[in-house]
Every structure is written in structure tokens, then in C-alpha cells.
């Protein structure tokens, strides 16, 4: 009994220390680690946040491996990355053997592109094998690819629901199974899950998307515990949960106009910069903006009816309805054009 009591007080001290260290990081910004020369796989790199992640890692001289289902957009991202590499490719001067100045070329990272449908596990596994063979072992995995059906549940075809779940959630299992074994062997790596605030708390009209993001977060948290249990302290995990990001994915989504001025959609560049800061400082989780932390906490302690009242006040209860209406109208217009 005394042993359990002693261990309990040790745990309390460790919890207190964790709070203190976390608070200190808010005051003193931790030093960012270098990812130069490390192989970084980014899924969904052809547009949106994936493209911005690629550009940020390129500025830090990482070796980029870009995955996307769209070859053209993926190559466009690769060209942007090459331009960044070119701008960074300035020779370093040092003293020569006879007192002169000698130019030494800097390390030149490369970018590789692969067409991969992460919704198909065979495509994931075969592409991962190509990456290992052609590039090398992966140091950083950014699970970023995502889709949204844009239909109310009872109007959504089963195939689109399955597609949302597979791309937004199941694909994380397959990419992780492809690259984690070597990370465990080397005790080195970093896995990033780009989820959403809609994986922490939900809203009406996007049941499939919310379920997929809740699943991705559950997978991420369980995997984080498994890595901790295996005592592999060289492998880090970062969960990224942004509020609505202005990438066009949820175009038309609106909360109450009086509130929107204080909580506008996030600029993609700001979202990625915040995520990069978390990744490079090995932060386990980042929510953007910080009010998402508070909303998630309140959801955990408030009665459901109280949450409904807050949603209605904020205009969050039906915020997706304009988006869904736009998607439905666009689909009807396409069907009309195809029928002419």
C-alpha cells in the first residue's frame, strides 16, 4: 500500500512538472529543430495546405516526396519547390588553402513526385515501396490528404461516404504501416496528422467528414500512446487541428456575421506556419486559433443542451448549410450541362 501511495505522489509531481514545462513553452519559445536533408512525405501535396507544407519544408532544405492523385497539380507544387531550392542554392565562401577564398557548393535537396490514390491501400503500399527504393527511408510523414462529400447524410451516396472515410482516416493507417517500421528500427521519425477542429467537436450536415476526422484523431492519439509504451523517444507525433481554413474546401460556410468578424476563416499560410512551429518544436498538438482549445474543453464539461444553445448563438449549428447548398447547386448545374 505504501508503494502505491508513493508512486501516486511521484505521478502528481510529474503531472505538475508537465504543466510547468508546458507553461514555460508559452513564455520561452523552444528552439526549432533542423530538417535539412531529411526525407519528408506529404500526402495531398498538389494543393491547399499540402502545397504550403511542401514550400515550408523546402525552405528548410528537406528532401520532399510529394504524393497526390492529380499529377498536374502535384508537378506544379514540385516546380514551386524547385524554385525555392534554386533561390537557396547560393555557394558558401570559405578560406582556401593558400589564403584565398574558395566557393563550396551547399547541399542541394531534391523533390520527387508520385501519383498516389491514398484511398487505395495497394496504391499506398506500392508507392511507399517506390519511395524507399528511389529516395530512401522516410524521416517525416505528413498525413494531409483530405476530401469532403458536401452532402447532407440522407442525400449522400454511400460511395462518397466511404470515400471520405477511406481518404481522411483509413489512409493514415496504411501510410503509417508503410513507414513506421523503419522509424521504430532507427528510433527516429516524425508523424504529423492534419485533422480538423471538426474532429474535436462537430456540426450539422457534415457527418461523414466529422466522423472521418474524429477517427483520424483517435488513431493518432492511440498511436502516440503505443509509441510511448514502446519507449521510442526518438519518434515524435504532432496533431494539427485548425478551425475553418480558407482553401475553398468549405466555400460558403458561414457562422453568425456579428461573430465572424472576431472568428474569420483562417488564412492557409497562417495555419501552416503555426503547424510548422509545432512540428519543428516537437509539440504534440496544435489548435489554431487557440480558442479551439477552450471550445473543446467546454464541450467536454457542458451538458449537450448547453452546447446546442451556444451553437445557435454563434450560428455554428447550421454554418455548413450554405456550403452544402452551393455544392448541390453546382452538382445540378453540371448534370444539366451534361444532359444538354
Image (cartoon, rainbow, N blue to C red):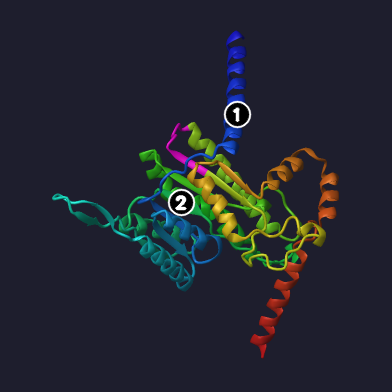
Whether label 1 touches label 2, CB < 8 Å:
no
**Number of marks:** 2
Whole-angstrom CA distance, mark 1 to mark 2, is 30 Å
Residue farthest bottom in this picture: 340
Between label 1 and label 2, give the one nearer the viewer: 1
Residue 188 image-quadrant placement: top left
Write the residue at 36% across / 65% down.
86
Image location (x, y in percent) of residue 310: 83, 49
The residue under label 2 is 141
Position of 248 relative to 196 (above/below): below
Q: Secondary structure at mark 2?
A: strand
Judged left or right of residue 73, residue 293 is right
Judged left or right of residue 80, residue 218 is right
Image location (x, y in percent) of residue 246: 64, 63
Image location (x, y in percent) of residue 108: 31, 58
Question: Closest to the observer: 221 or 96?
Answer: 96
The residue under label 1 is 20
The quadrant of the image that shows the N terminus is top right
Q: Mark number for residue 89?
A: none
Residue farthest top in this picture: 2
User: Which span is picked out in magenta?
Assistant: 230-237
Question: Closest to the observer: 111 or 266?
Answer: 266
Position of 78 relative to 288 (above/below): below
Residue 21 among those drawn in magenta: no
Write the residue at 50% across / 57% down.
53
Judged left or right of residue 305, residue 1 is left
Amino acid at each position: 500500500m505504501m508503494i502505491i501511495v508513493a508512486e501516486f505522489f511521484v505521478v502528481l509531481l510529474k503531472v505538475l512538472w508537465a504543466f510547468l514545462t508546458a507553461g514555460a513553452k508559452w513564455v520561452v519559445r523552444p528552439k526549432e529543430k533542423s530538417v535539412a536533408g531529411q526525407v519528408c512525405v506529404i500526402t495531398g501535396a498538389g494543393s491547399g495546405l499540402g502545397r504550403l507544407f511542401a514550400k515550408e519544408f523546402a525552405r528548410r532544405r528537406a528532401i520532399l516526396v510529394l504524393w497526390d492523385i492529380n499529377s498536374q497539380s502535384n508537378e506544379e507544387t514540385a516546380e514551386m519547390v524547385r524554385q525555392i531550392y534554386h533561390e537557396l542554392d547560393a555557394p558558401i565562401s570559405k578560406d582556401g588553402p593558400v589564403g584565398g577564398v574558395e566557393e563550396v557548393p551547399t547541399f542541394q535537396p531534391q523533390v520527387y513526385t508520385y501519383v498516389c490514390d491514398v484511398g487505395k491501400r495497394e496504391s499506398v503500399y506500392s508507392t511507399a515501396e517506390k519511395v524507399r527504393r528511389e529516395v530512401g527511408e522516410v524521416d517525416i510523414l505528413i498525413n494531409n490528404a483530405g476530401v469532403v462529400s458536401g452532402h447532407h447524410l440522407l442525400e449522400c451516396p454511400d460511395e462518397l461516404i466511404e470515400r471520405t472515410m477511406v481518404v481522411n482516416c483509413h489512409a493514415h493507417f496504411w501510410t503509417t504501416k508503410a513507414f513506421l517500421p523503419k522509424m521504430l528500427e532507427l528510433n527516429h521519425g516524425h508523424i504529423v496528422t492534419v485533422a480538423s477542429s471538426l474532429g474535436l467537436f462537430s456540426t450539422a450536415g457534415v457527418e461523414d467528414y466529422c466522423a472521418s476526422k474524429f477517427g483520424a484523431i483517435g488513431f493518432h492519439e492511440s498511436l502516440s500512446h503505443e509509441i510511448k509504451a514502446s519507449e521510442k523517444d526518438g519518434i515524435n507525433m504532432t496533431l494539427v487541428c485548425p478551425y475553418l481554413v480558407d482553401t475553398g474546401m468549405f466555400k460558403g460556410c458561414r457562422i453568425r456575421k456579428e461573430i465572424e468578424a472576431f472568428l474569420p476563416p483562417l488564412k492557409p499560410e497562417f495555419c501552416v506556419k503555426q503547424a510548422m512551429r509545432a512540428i519543428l518544436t516537437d509539440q504534440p498538438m496544435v489548435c489554431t486559433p487557440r480558442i479551439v482549445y477552450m471550445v473543446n474543453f467546454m464541450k467536454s464539461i457542458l451538458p449537450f443542451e448547453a452546447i446546442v444553445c451556444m451553437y445557435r448563438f454563434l450560428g455554428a449549428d447550421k454554418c455548413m448549410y450554405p456550403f452544402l447548398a452551393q455544392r448541390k447547386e453546382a452538382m445540378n448545374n453540371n448534370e444539366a450541362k451534361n444532359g444538354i
